[in-house]
């Protein structure tokens, strides 16, 4: 293709509202154009990347035996009412009434519609397993859309749904998709990690996020460099950092700690390591009657080592907290502890307050905690001697770098990541709600076991840039670059030799199936090179009169510090090597 | 591909609400599945056809120099308010409010958004001409969606928009698209006609519809078999059927015609040809003041030959009627004619009624019309002698078969058609409303000349079926068939020889790039053949033990009356010939 047949629109400056580098570079490279908050036009340059991402996803989904269909953007509310999501989903679900005042939604995902299809089409065990997918426009009415295509409102997603006869078969479908996702992200040329993720109310251990590694990522992902353990921070298991509880060696003492309401301040004052302190967090759970009035409130004291943070997802899985918890009010804290926050501790706490100690806290001896008296802490606190054993010991903290890996094979590291894919075992959540049954060998109706598998197509484009850029612009992996090769002729509009050489190389590469663009705009070299470095085309060939005199061209990879001279005769071979073709 | 890796779901019966053959066959062949009124899931079999249609359109649009982008489904209301379409479009425009109560629409088309892009991106004459297109989901909230994908609410459309510096250049862009459309519909394998169409308020002669010929089409398309004249019925020019007005030969007489309120009944009673009668239609136009109150009503008498029909589009272009007209009420008719409808005529009609005669009527002599007295008609009516010349003579009728072609090169024929494409010169309608200006050589801002070019992707699928089917099912043109070739092995699940031969042929054809499906379901021949005839795959090869014994297979084209025996050695060559590969 020639630039004159395409549309190139680069900008020197990014708009002020572009917060992250991918958003800035996509705007500057003319890949997207804002239409409204979180709504973008995909300009020709951006659409080429999206289509390449889609093509790779499609090929690998087909290879994995999934079958493509297309479900509508506008979906009737009835199906969403059947599963209860019409009520459960908040304003994120864009709702619309048609001319007859009937309710519809603009789909954010398609579990309801695919389950509706499956309950009509998949009637017999002979038809299972089956996996349907589509690549379709989605809409989520985010409260605060931002980061360009990373958290937009309208976006493109591939969502697949598997239907199986039993849990075992569903597990195989899950593994099949997990493997396909690996092939997809490999082919996309991205550094990524598949991490175990929380399954929420569904339970079980079959949920993995595919995270593109990037310093700017919103998610913390935990992995063990010496094993294949990997999980997101919500799920990653934190083991006790002490093998067993030490013996008490110090007496319990009350110490004045005026104004020292944090563990760090207390440790500093007392000249003790932060790891010797215990922080106290107070939660509350409310029981309600059928009318929705609170009939009983329970207060919970959660204990964490001073340098650790609460993991609310883990806390939310504990008996008693599962139905939902909140942080206690200051009044509730004063009522149960006789003290303001900052000086709370487990010593002397009476029923009905329930005490939950993190695994590490449960092994600590001679520790420091608040004295339940303003401006005082206790030192030399020991379980059993100074206070009863906690009501429960549990993993309620976030892991930190250097924690032992829960598989016992090393220590954990943490990276930032951008979630671009998710495989999830759904069980019968939707099939049971919507009566999606098949008949087994005995003619008995059984709900289908389902899985869902999403990939954020447009988000991948942003994530790829977050991972691959420099101060000059984007650096595309070749497989999803808008063009694999750009030909930059110098003086295209005044040299017949340059024109002819550029045209010939363009035609030769095109004939080989190389996605090449010839920049025939006649721009000056500086502006032309800056454009293509901003746009991020991975391979560039410069054609100039000066070079041609010696039968030479200049090749430069987007990550190369400088250009390499190459003969006209060898350039195609060189490019094919570089492209791995 | 093998059937077991795909999804085939055929039905014996079509649902009761399927009115047209394409809707019935698409439902029965498992190509679409209804989700709501006018909203369909495109099932795997249907999606394959849609993707092939899209690919052909995309290739030819690119070849014509158009550049693909993608504009959002959800679009902010502001742009639609800028052009006034927010108010002008009725409930067909699906409107939605986001969580912040801001107005959006679900796009039925994208003139506003592309003009918004153009006014920001196309600043200089050097950037023109430019043509952008996208293939995107559209929504039109039809009052009565029906005919499956032919008049659905959610549908896929390709819409392109050209931007030019002046009318002459815009004309070239228009011709370029017109030519591209010809290549697209040729490649789709459809019989079609490009017909001149009405340009409405835009004016000019640059509007063509691309109509797929089908007896079941909603549109009447007019053409001259002896020339290239073609227009839709709204536009097709009707010439006077009499070269000049004949002399009066009969006296004016009033005749009793009790109960004969139609021209046909009167002609029969009087023993005269219908072509001797004139029918009278009464229209009214209202002038309103700024408050919207009617301040003046004008009544119009339109005269047509008894066998002709009024063309409301033509009438709507006449001076005085342009701003909109309605049919007069019975009260208004009684008031101005002193008579009920059925017996009206032009003789004795007084100002302020305006009389408009069709071109043919203006040449008639000795004609019959109502006497403006119930149960009476006049015969031997003659212009000039019995009544003054009409206020205007105009083409206000639909052409009929056998009318002289307006280019004087023969007579007109009429076919039914389904509109699947439209090319339209927009002029500056949108660019002026939205200030989409470019700077010319002198730095002077000028509005861009625009054209818009639509193709109904999903509608093409329906139209192709309306044109190509028989009592057994669909007959796809090869270029858009879900599969070009189906291999039907007999006894696949019990004969190793059949399996091996089928597999080998499948692999060989696949390697040649032939879109082949191997039906490995193990269905019995009757059911299997019926499925593929219903689905409409154009080429079928049957592989059986009996045939293989003699080294033979059976080939049958979907339109062939019977199968042809072909050797295993020759089948690939035969298929390549049939496929034109």
Image (cartoon, coloured by chain):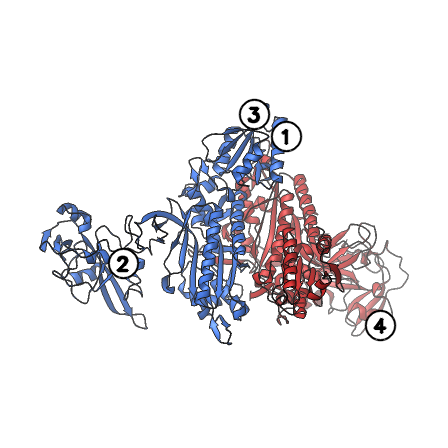
Chain colours: A red, B blue
For this rendering, which residue is in front, B95 or A504?
A504
Q: CA distance from mark 2 to mark 1?
A: 69 Å
Label annotation for residue B547 = 3
Which quadrant of the view contains residue B252? bottom left
In the picture shown, does residue B554 fall above or below A205?
above
Instruction: Locate residue B504 relative to residue B145 in the image: left or right.
Output: right
Contact? badges 3 and 1 (CB < 8 Å): no
Residue under numbered circle 1: B500
Q: CA distance from mark 3 to mark 1?
A: 14 Å
Label annotation for residue A269 = 4
Chain where mark 4 sits = A
Contact? badges 2 and 1 (CB < 8 Å): no
* Image position, residue B493 (x, y; %): 60, 28
Residue under numbered circle 2: B395
In the picture shown, does residue A447 fall above or below B204?
above
First of labels 3, 1 by sequence position: 1
Chain where mark 3 sits = B
For this rendering, which residue is in front, A2 or A387?
A2
Q: CA distance from mark 4 to mark 2?
A: 101 Å
Residue A390 visible here: yes
First of labels 3, 2 by sequence position: 2
């Amino acid at each position: 293709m020639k630039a004159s047949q395409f549309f190139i629109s680069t900008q020197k400056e990014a708009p002020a509202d572009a917060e992250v580098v991918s958003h800035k570079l996509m705007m500057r490279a003319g890949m997207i154009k804002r239409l409204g908050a979180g709504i973008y036009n995909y300009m020709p340059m951006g659409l080429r990347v999206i289509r390449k991402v889609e093509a790779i996803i499609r090929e690998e989904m087909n290879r994995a035996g999934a079958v493509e269909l297309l479900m509508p953007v506008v979906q009737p509310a009835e199906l969403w009412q059947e599963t209860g999501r019409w009520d459960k989903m908040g304003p994120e679900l864009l709702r619309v009434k048609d001319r007859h005042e009937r309710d519809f939604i603009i789909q954010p995902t398609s579990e309801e519609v695919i389950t509706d299809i499956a309950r009509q089409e998949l009637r017999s065990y002979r038809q299972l397993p089956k996996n349907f997918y589509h690549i379709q426009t989605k809409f989520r009415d985010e409260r605060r859309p931002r980061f360009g295509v990373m958290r937009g409102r309208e976006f493109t997603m591939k969502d697949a749904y598997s239907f199986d006869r039993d849990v075992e078969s569903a597990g195989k479908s899950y593994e099949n998709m997990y493997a396909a996702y690996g092939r997809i992200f490999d082919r996309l040329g991205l550094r990524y990690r598949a991490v175990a993720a929380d399954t929420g109310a569904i339970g079980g251990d079959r949920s993995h996020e595919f995270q593109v590694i990037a310093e700017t990522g919103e998610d913390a992902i935990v992995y063990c460099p010496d094993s294949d353990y990997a999980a997101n921070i919500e799920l990653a298991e934190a083991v006790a950092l002490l093998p067993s509880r030490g013996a008490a060696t110090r007496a319990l003492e009350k110490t004045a700690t005026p104004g020292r309401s944090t563990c760090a301040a207390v440790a500093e004052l007392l000249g003790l390591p932060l790891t010797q302190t215990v922080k106290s967090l107070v939660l509350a759970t409310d029981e309600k009657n059928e009318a929705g009035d609170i009939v009983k409130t329970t207060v919970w004291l959660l204990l964490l080592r001073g340098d650790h943070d609460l993991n609310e997802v883990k806390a939310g899985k504990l008996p008693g907290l599962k139905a939902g918890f909140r942080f206690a009010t200051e009044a509730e804290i004063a009522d149960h502890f006789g003290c303001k926050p900052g000086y709370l501790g487990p010593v002397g706490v009476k029923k009905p307050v329930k005490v939950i100690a993190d695994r590490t806290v449960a092994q600590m001896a001679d520790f420091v905690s608040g004295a339940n008296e303003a401006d005082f802490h206790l030192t030399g606190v020991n379980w059993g001697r100074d206070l009863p054993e906690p009501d429960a010991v549990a993993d309620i903290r976030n892991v930190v770098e250097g924690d032992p890996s829960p598989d016992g094979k090393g220590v954990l590291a943490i990276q930032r990541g951008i979630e671009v894919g998710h495989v999830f075992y759904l069980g019968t959540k939707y099939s049971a709600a919507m009566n999606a049954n098949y008949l087994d060998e005995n003619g008995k109706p059984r709900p289908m076991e389902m899985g869902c598998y999403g990939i954020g197509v447009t988000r991948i484009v942003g994530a790829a840039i977050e991972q691959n850029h420099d101060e000059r612009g984007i650096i595309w992996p070749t497989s999803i670059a808008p063009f694999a090769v750009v030909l930059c002729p110098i003086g295209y509009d005044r040299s017949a030799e340059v024109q002819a050489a550029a045209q010939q190389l363009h035609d030769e590469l095109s004939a080989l199936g190389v996605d090449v663009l010839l920049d025939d705009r006649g721009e000056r070299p500086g502006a032309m090179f800056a454009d293509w470095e901003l746009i991020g085309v991975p391979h560039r060939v410069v054609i100039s009169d000066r070079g041609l005199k010696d039968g030479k061209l200049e090749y430069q990879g987007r990550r190369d510090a400088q250009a390499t001279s190459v003969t006209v005769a060898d350039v195609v071979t060189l490019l094919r090597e570089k492209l791995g073709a």
